């Protein structure tokens, strides 16, 4: 049953006529699905199979509105079906469905050409939102937790739900604009006045290429995107990689001033980004 359901949709979205061993699929379906007075075993299996695949496709669309807007309906549909055929769901939760979509876009660039690099950035950003929404949260470090550890020994962990993104396009603005437009469409569909509105039909302009550093995170159970400057980004990357605080400050660059680092840390501590690294204890100096 599982194999029959998970076999990718074919031309016309019908089941393949043959089973994996060459026997007629109709005969195999009759072994585990009973017919009724209206549908054969094979026809009933087809309903289940389409329902399974349409549900997966809808979930990808829901999680990736920016990618859908970027590629258009036809191209996005082909991308999603190709992705699900190569990387079918293997988790008990649909939350993980798009985890390998950025990787798939890199592996098969023809599916998103000529906007593969932009599509990859959008897919990374949208997956980071899923991680931020319900990713693990560890106990937040307080100033007292780190006050007695020398900076040359201090190693800080970043919250698992936090994602650091070095992007080639400002896709955060693009995805936000797409979501706002989609929200207006849903709102308009629920009112009696169905007169067309230009704002609902307007296509969101594609972003212009510009290096952008974004932290996708949550705060007080809400999703946020915070842009940061390159030096601050390099510092957070170093901390995430396990460098000491002194090493992380050095990674930020020689022109970083002490008051800048202090201001960054005040913000990051307030947002609760720091936690204890797994398996590590803070050393006392």
Image (tube, rainbow, N blue to C red):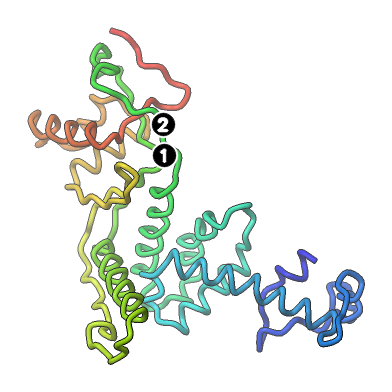
Label 1 residue SS = loop
Q: CA distance from mark 1 to mark 2?
A: 8 Å
Whole-percent x and y of residue 202?
Answer: 25, 84
State the image quarter where residue 192 is shown. bottom left
Q: Residue at x 23, y 88 (%)?
A: 198
Foreground: disc 1 or disc 2: 2
Identify the disc placed on residue 184.
Answer: none
As drawn, 63 above or below 253: below
Q: Which quadrant does the N terminus fall into?
A: bottom right
Q: Residue at x 23, y 83 (%)?
A: 199
Whole-percent x and y of residue 216?
Answer: 31, 50
Whole-percent x and y of residue 233?
Answer: 24, 43
Q: Residue at x 32, y 46 (%)?
A: 217
Give the residue at the far top of this rendering.
285
Whole-percent x and y of residue 243?
Answer: 33, 28
Q: Disc 1 marks which residue?
A: 160
State the image quarter where residue 137 is shown. top left
As drawn, 132 above or below 123: above
Give the residue at the far bottom of this rendering.
195
Give the residue at the far front of this rendering.
192
Residue placed most toward the observer, 261 or 93: 93
Mark 1 crowdedness (10 Å alpha carbons): few <14, some 14-19, many ≥20: some
Identify the disc placed on residue 138.
Answer: 2
281 on left or right of 228: right
As drawn, 116 above or below 199: above
Residue placed most toward the observer, 65 or 250: 65
Between disc 1 and disc 2, whose residue precedes? 2
Q: Which quadrant does the C terminus fall into?
A: top left
Q: Residue at x 88, y 69 (%)?
A: 32
212 on left or right of 13: left
Q: Are marks 1 and 2 in contact (CB under 8 Å)?
A: yes
Mark 2 crowdedness (10 Å alpha carbons): few <14, some 14-19, many ≥20: some
């Amino acid at each position: 049953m599982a194999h029959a359901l998970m076999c990718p949709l074919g031309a016309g979205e019908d089941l393949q006529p043959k089973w994996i061993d060459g026997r007629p699929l109709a005969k195999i379906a009759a072994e585990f699905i009973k017919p009724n007075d209206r549908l054969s075993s094979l026809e009933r299996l087809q309903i289940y199979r389409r329902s399974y695949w349409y549900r997966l496709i809808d979930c990808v669309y829901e999680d990736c509105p920016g990618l859908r807007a970027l590629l258009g309906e036809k191209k996005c549909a082909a991308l999603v079906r190709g992705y699900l055929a190569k990387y079918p769901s293997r988790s008990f939760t649909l939350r993980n469905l798009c985890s390998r979509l950025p990787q798939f876009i890199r592996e098969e660039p023809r599916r998103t050409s000529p906007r593969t690099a932009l599509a990859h950035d959008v897919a990374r950003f949208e997956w980071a939102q899923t991680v931020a929404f319900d990713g693990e949260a560890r106990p937040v470090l307080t100033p007292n937790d780190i006050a007695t550890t020398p900076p040359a020994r201090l190693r800080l962990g970043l919250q698992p739900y936090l994602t650091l993104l070095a992007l080639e396009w400002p896709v955060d603005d693009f995805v936000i604009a797409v979501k706002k437009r989609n929200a207006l469409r849903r709102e308009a569909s629920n009112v009696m006045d169905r007169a067309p509105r230009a704002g609902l039909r307007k296509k969101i302009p594609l972003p212009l290429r510009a290096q952008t550093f974004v932290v996708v995170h949550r705060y007080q159970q809400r999703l946020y995107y915070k842009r940061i400057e390159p030096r601050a980004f390099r510092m957070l990357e170093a901390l995430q990689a396990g460098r000491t605080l002194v090493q992380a400050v050095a990674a930020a660059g020689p022109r970083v001033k002490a008051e800048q680092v202090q201001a960054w840390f005040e913000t990051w501590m307030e947002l609760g980004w720091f936690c204890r690294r797994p398996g590590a204890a803070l050393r006392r100096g």
